Amino acid sequence: MKRRVLGLMGAFLLLPAVAFAVPVAITWEWTLDDPDVTTFRYQLDGEDPDGWTVVDASHTSYTAENMDGTKSYTLYLQQSYDGEHFSASATSTSEPLETEEPVPAEPVVEQAPTVAETPVSAEAETAPAPVAEEPAAEASVPSESEPVAVAEPASEPVATPVAPQPAAKAPKNRAPFRFGFGVYGSADKVLDEDSYPVLDFHHSWFPELGGEIKLENILAGKHVGIGLDLRGAWVPTPEGKWKDVFDHLDELNNAMYGSAALELDLNFGKTLLTLGAGGFGAYNLDDWTYGVLGSAGIGYHFTKHLYMGVDGQYRYYLDNTEKAQTLSGSASMLLTF
């Protein structure tokens, strides 16, 4: 009897045990069906703007560790062609563990053995009464009719594959438009020393310090666009030698420079190659000059709002009798939107 009671208590104690949370790992997978997609981002159980995890297109799965196996979880996935504009979310929900509750064993009620009554003869009255044999103790092995609680292994949660939605905000047939402004610095070299002074610069090279406005992909295709670059700068040069400039800061020759160039924008993800052509002008309060220019440059969008680039320019001065020519190299840092 004690063994049966203990077995029955064990069956009922198993019920709360299977109700506890089971730590599991859940994996979501998706496919890259568009070679122009460069970026994915995903988030578990929500679409918080600050809660996304951003990965490049080589990552096509995500595994969440130590999750509660009795609950379901939803993964939100988005894709992008440029890493800035993302599609609507595709979702996939995992299924919780399928646990089979054990069925408690039915209690067994022991009954006392019954003895059939038989008439007793006179002769039998003097005979010793037969001793009823006690029934043998039953083994504690359950019979076929008794239910047995079997703990089956729990299956892992199933996460269906995620199908990314198309990036509607950044169509793959158009490079993104960007507006940027910031500062640049340049050093200009006169190719033929016999052709200067240019606006009384009196030196074979001179600096430019100024501001820049850049419009990328005003008209654009998938990787090629037309942009515009505008620059304005201060051009200081000393009367004497450059090594003595700090001794004669009050004797600087100052000129203002401006240029405008149409650019061919070649887009490769966050990298931008530019080829430009346009015109320029300079004025030093006494005289002015102008000409045409050609440029080539390369830049990189480090973040959504930070662009840095370098470029070189060739300038041909049209009004100078000696037809002065200069080469310049510049570096830019722009805020983009």
Image (tube, rainbow, N blue to C red):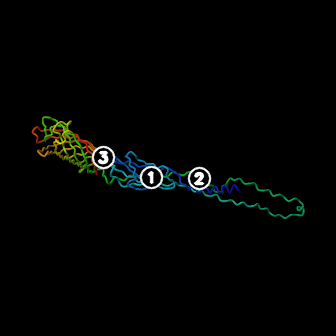
Q: Earlier in the sequence, mark 1 or mark 3?
A: 1
What is the three-letter code of the residue carrying label 1? Thr
Labels 1 & 3 near each other (Cβ < 8 A): no
Residue 52, x across and y down, in percent: 39, 52
Tell me the mark number nearer the camera, choosing from 3 and 2: 3
Question: Disc 1 to disc 2, how far (Cα)?
Answer: 27 Å
Looking at the image, residue 102 lies above or below residue 208: below
Q: Earlier in the sequence, mark 3 or mark 2?
A: 2
Residue 40, x across and y down, in percent: 37, 49
What is the three-letter code of the residue carrying label 2? Ala
Q: Earlier in the sequence, mark 1 or mark 2?
A: 2
Labels 1 & 2 near each other (Cβ < 8 A): no
Q: Residue at x 90, y 64 (%)?
A: 122
- Callout 2 crowding tier (Cα within 10 Å): few <14, some 14–19, many ≥20: few
Which corner quadrant of the image does residue 271 belong to? top left
Q: Residue 160 got which mark? A: 1
Residue 299, x across and y down, in percent: 27, 43
Task: Quickly name the residue at label 2.
Answer: 151
Looking at the image, residue 3 lies above or below residue 314: below
Which structural element holds mark 3? strand
Looking at the image, residue 314 lies above or below residue 83: above
Q: Quick one: quadrant of the N terminus?
A: bottom right
Taking the image as shown, residue 68 lies to the left or right of residue 238, namely right
Residue 9, x across and y down, in percent: 65, 57
**Which of 34/80 is in front?**
80
What is the three-letter code of the residue carrying label 3? His
Question: Disc 1 to disc 3, how far (Cα)?
Answer: 35 Å
Q: Residue 301 got which mark? A: 3
